[in-house]
Image: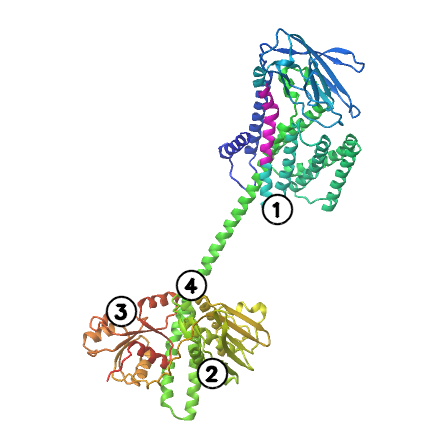
Amino acid sequence: MVAMTIVACQTILMRAPFFWFPLTPARVSARSLAGFVLLCLAGLCLLVAAASSALAAPVAIEPGVVMPEVEVQDESGRWVPTTLPYRWRSTATDTSRRLTFRLRFDLPAVPTTMWAMRADRMPPDRQLTLNGQLLSGALQDRALVRRFALPAQWVDVPPNLLRAGSNELLMTLELSHRVGALAPVTLGPADALRPDFDRLVWFTVSLPQALNMAAAGLALFILLIWWLRPAERVLGYFGALWLLVSVRNMAYFVTNGHLPPAVSDYLFYAAQVFSAPLVAGFALAIARRPWPLPRAAVVAVLALMLLIGALGLWLDRMVLVRQWVYPCFLVVLCWVAWLLWQGVRQLAPLARRGMAVALGALVVAAVHDYLYATGGLPYLGMQPVLNHLMGTFWVPWVSPLLLLVGARVLLQRFVQALDLSEHHGQLLEQRVADRTRELQAANAAKTRFVAAASHDLRQPVASIGLLAGLLREQVNGSASRAVLDRLTESVAALESLLKGLLDMSRFDAGSVQVRPQRLQLQSLFDAVAAHERDAAALKGLQLRLHASGLSVQADPVLLEQMVRNLVSNAVRYTERGGVLVAARRRGDGVLLQVWDTGCGVPDDKQASIFEEFVQLDNPARERHRGLGLGLSLVRRASQLMAVPLSLRSVPGKGSCFSLMLPRVGAAQRIATVAPAKPRSLRGMQIVVVDDDEGIRESLRLRIETWGARVQCYGSVAALRDALQRQGLPQTLDLVMSDQRLPDGNAMDVLGVLQPRWPDLPALIITGDTAPADLARLQATGLRVLHKPFSSEALFDAMREVVPGERG
């Protein structure tokens, strides 16, 4: 209940407009702290006032006996009359001293109900006899131990021990307290005495224990924060210190512990020893200063103090040990107080005053408790309210208050640091977002520029390629043939570079779809060999592809592209030796490897070679070594197909690229394909729409050599005019249109022709490589041929769209 009350008060303080403040890194909320301190002090005063009022209330006992007049036995054995409350003070040599009190009272008759004896202050080490019979307790020889509390005592008195007339109660008390007291003793019916006694115990024992238990929970919470954030040393030291203080405060009220008295005494001493470095560490952390001594030296001093305490306990000299050790702690505390002041000075003025009030309250409580424990307070002669107020320990009441105040300040600083960190994080995120937008804009601009430049480059390259192929078929002279070969080689290099950019754009656009099927590796090897053998022979390299009867489940187009890029890369970077392509079984898969004897790749560069436009051994960016896109395309294709790709390489000796493919059962070997017929489009009527005159003429000349009749137009409007003038033939076999036209696109061309020829086959030719353009083209479902293209690719695409031949 107390813990819930503290949490509720904390919540109210956090939400109330008077106490709430904006969390800023520059200041601590002085108003919040001052209000919090005042509220805690007011609550503490109310609790003490309520406790004092309840304890001062008279107890109505009818019938009952209140015995302030007693007799005490002196050292000679004589009974000396005295009045309760009775006080005494012991020294370290009074370990065997005992006091015996005699109380006499008369009863008119023997009670019929259970009676009880209540004493608001009585040492727990006592023996009570009533009318010669043992009532409670048992005396034992024990050394003087530090018992802090003088709790109220309750003893049940059976009616059969009482008698009508005169009764005698003997109380023998061990002087286990250095300063002790015996309050007036009250006897009466248990039912009448119990309610007031329970209130007394609740206010003097249960409530301070509950407060310190709640404080210990808060200290554990602070320690948990430190555990999660070890850099918060202030919270760590503070939480550990107040956990120790709270546990020690709760131990003040333990009178019947299970530990031997000597062990309890040593544990209190050890708590004092450990509190010194915790206080020092907290002060150093809050003042932002390092430890003046090495950690090993601090640990050694602690171990020495504990060893001295153990030796004093063994020799029964704990009082002497405390007389020498505790002054050392006081010197440390003076230094700590100066450090704390250095740290507290960083707070706002009202916050400093709040901390000063809390620390001052703790100092006053400590001085009071010292005077109370040493007998310097004559509280027994005061009025009942002051008697109960002064005759108890104050530190267990005040230390939870100081803990709450200190925890609030420290947690505010912690929250402010988190708030500042969050603010900086938001600024960083904003900067990252701004930078990301800038990079995205720059990347989009770059993409648009590359797409535009690629489109403009593809137009003349496509025209040159078609014309070069056409001239090659018509020129027979060896000199002219050599020039055309050089021209064809240059055009092929340009087409290869532009094809790499196109493939990259297709991956960026997400238009590459995986269509896995059964594939015989031997057919793949034959295609790769036909494509790369000439390039290897020109460099004097041996290209070997081991025959394989294995079959895999893969996309044939993507896998061929991957292997061709790997082999082409190996040939490009190998000067001597050769390239080997092989496949073998590996568990349920097929391990396909491409080996070369090239320059190799250093370990720290192996990840970067799969990035775009990276070439390790081409500082001059030689044209014949490409753009550095081949391995990037291999990586993207492997990720798309979920095919593991790995690299092993030794610089100066060579590299090995490996692909792990899923294996399937061997398929029946495909029969040899009949030789292809000569290229012919004889009798076909074809319409070509392109705004580039060079492309139009190149296509017309190229297609007419294959026997087709071609009509060319430069725009959608020109095609529409020809249709209206009946300038088109009655039958059309194919329309070829550029995607980008001055007044439309290829779909607009189809929109003009399809009303008259609904099933007209179409082939789109384009130089666009932007990802968005590629996605739109894929959505049309039409066959697309990307510029530049060779004569062979053009014929194959036309035959794919119009497979038949007219007679």
Q: Position of residue 457 (x, y in %)?
A: 40, 75
Nearer-N-terminus badge (1/3): 1
Q: Which residue is mark 3?
A: 748
Q: Is residue 151 in view? A: yes
Q: Which residues are magenta?
A: 197-217
Instruction: Using the image, determine if residue 518 lies above or below residue 367.
Output: below
Which numbered disc covers residue 683? none
Q: CA distance from mark 3 to mark 2?
A: 44 Å
- By secondary structure, the bulk of the magenta-drawn segment is best described as helix
- The residue shown at (42%, 67%) is 507
Nearer-N-terminus badge (1/4): 1
Q: CA distance from mark 2 to mark 4?
A: 39 Å
Q: Are marks 3 and 2 in contact (CB under 8 Å)?
A: no
Q: CA distance from mark 1 to mark 3?
A: 68 Å
In the rendered structure, the answer to whether residue 516 lies left or right of residue 4 reads: left
Q: Which residue is mark 2?
A: 533
Q: Pointer 2: residues within 10 angstroms few (<14), some, or many (20+)?
A: some
Residue 804 occupies quadrant:
bottom left
